[in-house]
Amino acid sequence: MLQFVDRAQAFPPKRQAPLRAQDFREIAERYAPPAAEEQAGRCSQCGVPYCSVHCPLHNHIPDWLRLTAEGRLREAYELSNSTSTMPEICGRICPQDRLCEGNCVIEFSQHGSVTIGSVEKFITDTAWDQGWVEPLQPGRARGQSVGVIGAGPAGLTAAEYLRVLGYDVHVYDRHDRPGGLLTYGIPGFKLEKPVVLRRTDRLAAGGIVFHQGFEVGRDATLDQLRDKHDAILIATGVYKARAIKAPGVGLSGVVEALDYLIASNRKSFGDAVPAFDDGSLDAAGKNVVVIGGGDTAMDCVRTAIRQGAASVKCLYRRDRANMPGSQRETANAEEEGVEFVWLSAPEAFDTKGNGGGDKVGTVKATGMRLGAPDASGRRAPEPDPGAAFDVPADLVIKALGFDAEDLPTLFDAPELGVTRWGTIRTDARTMMSNLDGVFAAGDIVKGASLVVQAIRDGRDVSERMHAWLKTQAKAPVAREMVAA
Ligand SMILES: Cc1cc2nc3c(=O)[nH]c(=O)nc-3n(C[C@H](O)[C@H](O)[C@H](O)COP(=O)(O)OP(=O)(O)OC[C@H]3O[C@@H](n4cnc5c(N)ncnc54)[C@H](O)[C@@H]3O)c2cc1C
Ligand code: SF4
């Protein structure tokens, strides 16, 4: 250990940009074992590990790094797995530069952080290869059932822990495949889909019942599910796209980011997607303009490159230092040929240059400048008079973020309490909503956040649901369990 002075930071090598832009595979391979052990050996084994403090799961990072450096990979896996339901997924897609690695002490001393995410991915991918990932073992049956609405990371994590505790667990999701945004939002070049599906297959094999293509609100009301189960978890994420108010926004060729990404992910699965096949959601040969500066925008620009767009520009109203998306992802996008137009925002969309019809041809943009910091601490953008310009565009993708859908109306449950942002209002201690036995977790409580945060929520809510369900147990067998 403590090799950080003599041993330089080395991430697993990325494939060359022109090569990786031709497919949807992840851009970096995982470490070969000696490299993983060497990189783990750079850890300074801090007494107070800031990496763990800043990991939402408080993973035992220095401990599994030490085990990896010593070649004790199975133990490293078991420890890493003890705090997370999906360590290899977090290792791939957490914004480590803002979380564990960004708070690594050797990063502060200018040596470059330990490559924690890449080692985490290596450990659990190795465990899958070696057959160390054991089947899910359900606990002794309690005779109580739980309905989980939403098969994203929050719902799946809660489902796993509750099944281990002996509950019958049913997961309801409106998509045809489980995984939530892991499956249909995040593109394969960040997270290959078999990595997600081997996790969900393991849960199904452990007796968790998945009801795919089941939309709560359409196929059942919330009350109907409450009648069927002893407790309910709402983990539906946030899906209402934020709107742009600008003339011409309704033109054809101006599309929503998630529609675009879902279509692309479905094509990677080999599905028939009419809106892709007729060209509406396919960037091939087009001048593409993506509006936004978060993770979703980064995923759209890089998807457009892979689909063979003629040009890809990203318009963002702040500058690079003030963008919400990961700096690493921005650098990846630039390497792949994306042009960022910082300090710019759309004012209108028009048909000029489209060759006729009601299709978008141009984004009329305005330059922006940064004013005083706003409530979030970031400097607020304001239009820069006289800095207008046009950008040719055949496809415009709106990626301004997401808010909560109107769940009380959708679920036919007007009594369900929500905040003024539409997220579900929960008791901070119990994680229960205002409805008895109805809990909530993940983005639908926090607003658009991160996968690792959803996993943390899923872990926490399973404990709170278990505590509450024990107080509700009726059958003798269940009373025995309470005593235990
Ligand atoms: C494009 C994109 C890229 C992202 N990239 C990253 C990243 O790189 N790293 C990162 O950490 N985070 C990323 N995020 C954020 C991350 O994906 C989310 O924070 C996380 O998935 C939230 O998990 P969740 O379980 O709360 O909800 P979700 O993953 O959204 O899952 C909710 C599930 O509920 C289902 N559902 C919704 N309504 C109903 C209903 N009425 N009936 C039945 N089912 C329903 C949905 O179909 C979905 O499967 C990204 C988000 C997006 C949109
Ligand atoms: S879960 Fe995310 S933040 Fe935590 S150690 Fe892994 S990569 Fe870092």
Image: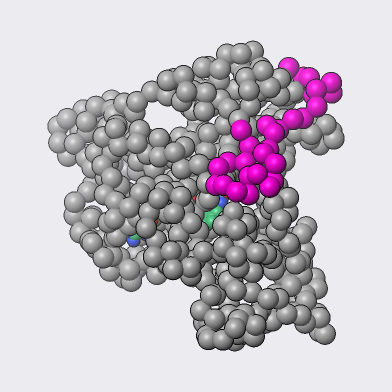
| Image spot of residue 315 (x, y percent) | 69, 68
Could one spot residue 167 in this view of the protein?
A: no
Image height of 133 relative to 156, above or below = above
Report whether 131 appears left or right of 256: left
User: Which residue lies most toward the left here?
Assistant: 476
| Image spot of residue 247 (x, y percent) | 59, 86
| Image spot of residue 233 (x, y percent) | 34, 50
Q: Quadrant of the C terminus?
A: top left
Report whether 205 appears left or right of 45: left
Whether residue 5 appears in magenta in the rendering, the answer is yes
- In this view, the residue in front, 221 or 230, is 221
- Residue drawn at x 42%, y 54% is 266
- In this view, the residue in front, 225 or 471, is 225
Asked which quadrant contains residue 157, the reply is: top left
Could one spot residue 203 in this view of the protein?
A: yes
| Image spot of residue 407 (x, y percent) | 37, 66
The majority secondary structure of the magenta stretch comes to loop
- Residue drawn at x 51%, y 69% is 256
Q: Quadrant of the N terminus?
A: top right
Q: Which residues are magenta?
A: 1-29
- Residue drawn at x 42%, y 24% is 133
Image height of 58 relative to 343, above or below = above
Q: How is the image coloured?
A: one colour
